Each structure stands twice: as structure tokens, then as C-alpha cells.
Amino acid sequence: MGLESFIPLPPGAKIDAQDLIPVKDTFVTIAMSRQPQKSCPCWCAAISNSTFDSATNVAFGDLREHPTILIGAHNNSWTLTMTENLRYVFDRQNAIVDRSDSQKHWSTTSHQLAEDYAIVSRVLNSKTGTTVITAAGIGHAGTRAAADFLTNPQSISALVKSLPKGWERKNIQIVLHTSVINQLPSAPERRCYLLLVK
């Protein structure tokens, strides 16, 4: 389960202190989300006049005005909405599934924070009519690893070299894996990528 998830409790329910796990420096903040603007030129056109805001403050009309980078999954309903019809999607709180192959999925458990998975997507003509890029993990570490992947010139260069001719005109999805050490993600590893013809 993503650590940034909301767990609904019935009225009057009590939480025992031993059920809580302290988590430090793990959430993707608006300030951290400024980083993708710096170095993802092969993913989208130059981003000038950028604005940064939380998902709860953004309306659909805002997304239609310019290309958008969405950070996070379970704490960002726009990411889930914009990617729900793609091949790789978030299913439940702790899994990524391949909608075309039910045998292919990646998951983690809420108690096992030793690894995480993420999806990076670039959708050229999204539901908004503009380009949407998402960097989202099952948990906070996966989201951070996805953002690190997007902003690392070596990672992007290696990816571009492995893509077939014409990738620039296609939607792309990448599933990433990261090991988590002291609640921080290691360098992300690609598990698979997919070019979507649309």
C-alpha cells in the first residue's frame, strides 16, 4: 500500500500506537515535484511558464491548457484518471497490473518496504488533448524513483537508445523497480517498456 494513501476508518475507531510505522522524509512535496521540469526535454517540449500545485487544487480545465506532469498515484486522482485506460495501471493499493496480460503484475506489501514499483507514462494526446507525463509509484519510494528516472540524463539516454525508430510520435509506458533502503529508493531499474500506438 502506498504510504501516502488514506485509510478510511469507521466513526469511533481507535488506532493503537503499535499499528503506526514512523516514516520520515518520504512524501513527494510540491517543491520536490519541481525537479522534473529541469531535465526531461525528450519527454515533452520545453516547459516554460510552469505552475505547480497539488492535485486537489487542479481542475480538468487547467490540465487542458498545457502539457502536464503528474506526480504520485494513490495521492493524485488525476494520475489514476489520465492513465486508467492504458496498458499498465495501478490496481488496488499495492499493485501494478498489465491489462493485456493478467499474469503480469508487480506488487509490494504494506509491511514489506524493501522494494517498490512505479510507472512512468508519456501520453501525447491524452484525455485533455495535451501531453501528460506521469511519474507514480505504488508507494512513496516508487514515486520518488520514477521522478529520479525522469530527471536523470543517463537513464533517459539509455532508454532512448533502446527505443525503436519513431518512438517520438508514440505514447510510452515504463514499469520501474527500486530497492528501498532506509525508506529511500535506490536507482530505478526498468522492468519493461511499452510503446502504445495512438
Image (cartoon, grey):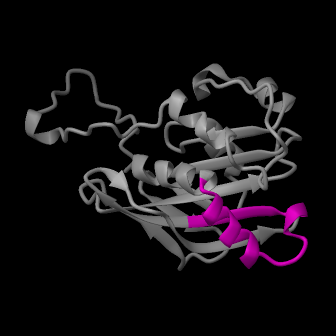
The span shown in magenta is 152-175
Q: In front here: 86 or 14?
A: 86
Question: Residue at image x 74%, y 37%?
Answer: 68
Is residue 34 toward the left or the right of residue 63 in the image? left
Examine the rendered structure and indicate whether residue 46 appears above or below residue 160: above
Question: Residue at image x 62%, y 64%?
Answer: 154
Give the farthest residue toward the front.
154
Whether residue 189 is visible to the viewer of this picture, yes or no, is: yes
Is residue 146 toward the left or the right of residue 196 in the image? left
Q: Position of residue 81 (x, y in %)?
A: 67, 43
Q: In front here: 189 or 105?
A: 189
Q: Is residue 155 magenta?
A: yes
Question: Residue at image x 50%, y 37%?
Answer: 75
Examine the rendered structure and indicate whether residue 155 appears above or below residue 7: below
Quadrant position of the C terminus in the picture: bottom right
What is the tally of numbered marks visible in this picture? 0
Q: Is residue 114 magenta?
A: no
Is residue 85 toward the left or the right of residue 44 in the image? left
Q: Position of residue 84 (x, y in %)?
A: 67, 52
Q: Position of residue 119 (x, y in %)?
A: 58, 58
Q: Position of residue 156 (x, y in %)?
A: 67, 63
Examine the rendered structure and indicate whether residue 173 appears above or below residue 131: below
Question: Residue at image x 79%, y 36%?
Answer: 47
Whether residue 87 is visible to the viewer of this picture, yes or no, is: no
